[in-house]
Image (cartoon, rainbow, N blue to C red):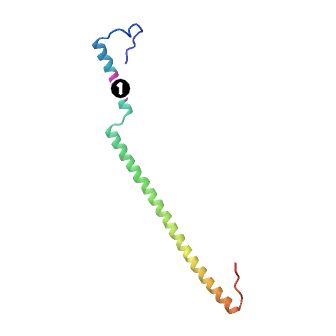
Amino acid sequence: MTTILTPDQENEPVTKGFLKQELDQSFESFTDKMFKTFATKDELSELREEMKEDNRKNTDKILKSNDELMAELKKNNENFTMNQAAHDRFEERITVLEEKTGISPVSV
């Protein structure tokens, strides 16, 4: 608690005891504010571990999501390859039919 001086006391000399008391109170007030504001090493270490765990969980989620996307992409690529092969077979059959029947190919 800081002592409030009256205007006529502000310019008066102070005693060592008064000064020590004021400094002790100011230091206690500062110390209280410091402990409420700043984190200790233990608190920072705890926060670091929490952040590491959250990071691991998020990394696992991302990797799982990527695995699912890659499986879907692989399936789509396989489907595309099968459709392309079927298309090529149909194209070949159509060409043979056109040649045997004498129908001219249609250009698109």
* Residue 31 highlighted magenta (yes or no): yes
Image: magenta residue range: 26-33
Q: Is residue 104 above or below residue 47?
A: below
* Residue closest to the far left: 16
Q: Is residue 101 above or below residue 108?
A: below
Q: Is residue 44 above or below residue 12?
A: below
Mark 1 surroundings: few (<14), some (14-19) or many (≥20) residues within 10 A: few
Please name the amino acid that badge 1 sits on.
Phe
Tell me what residue is drawn at x 33 percent, y 43 percent: 45
Tell me what residue is drawn at x 48 percent, y 60 percent: 65
In the rendered image, residue 29, in percent from the top left (x then y), is placed at: 36, 24
In the rendered image, residue 9, in percent from the top left (x then y), is placed at: 38, 8
Q: Quadrant of the C terminus?
A: bottom right
- Helix, strand or loop status at disc 1: helix
* Residue closest to the far top: 8
Picture quadrant where residue 87 is located: bottom right
Q: Quadrant of the N terminus?
A: top left
* Left-right relation of 74 to 42: right
Toward the viewer: 100 or 79? 100
Tell me what residue is drawn at x 59 percent, y 80 percent: 86
User: Majority secondary structure of the magenta segment?
Assistant: helix
Toward the viewer: 99 or 53? 99
Query: Mark 1 sits on what residue?
Result: 30
* Residue 51 highlighted magenta (yes or no): no
Tell me what residue is drawn at x 29 percent, y 17 percent: 20
* Residue closest to the far bottom: 100
* Left-right relation of 4 to 18: right
In the rendered image, residue 96, in percent from the top left (x then y), is placed at: 64, 89
Q: Is residue 67 above or below residue 41?
A: below
In the rendered image, residue 40, in percent from the top left (x then y), is placed at: 33, 37
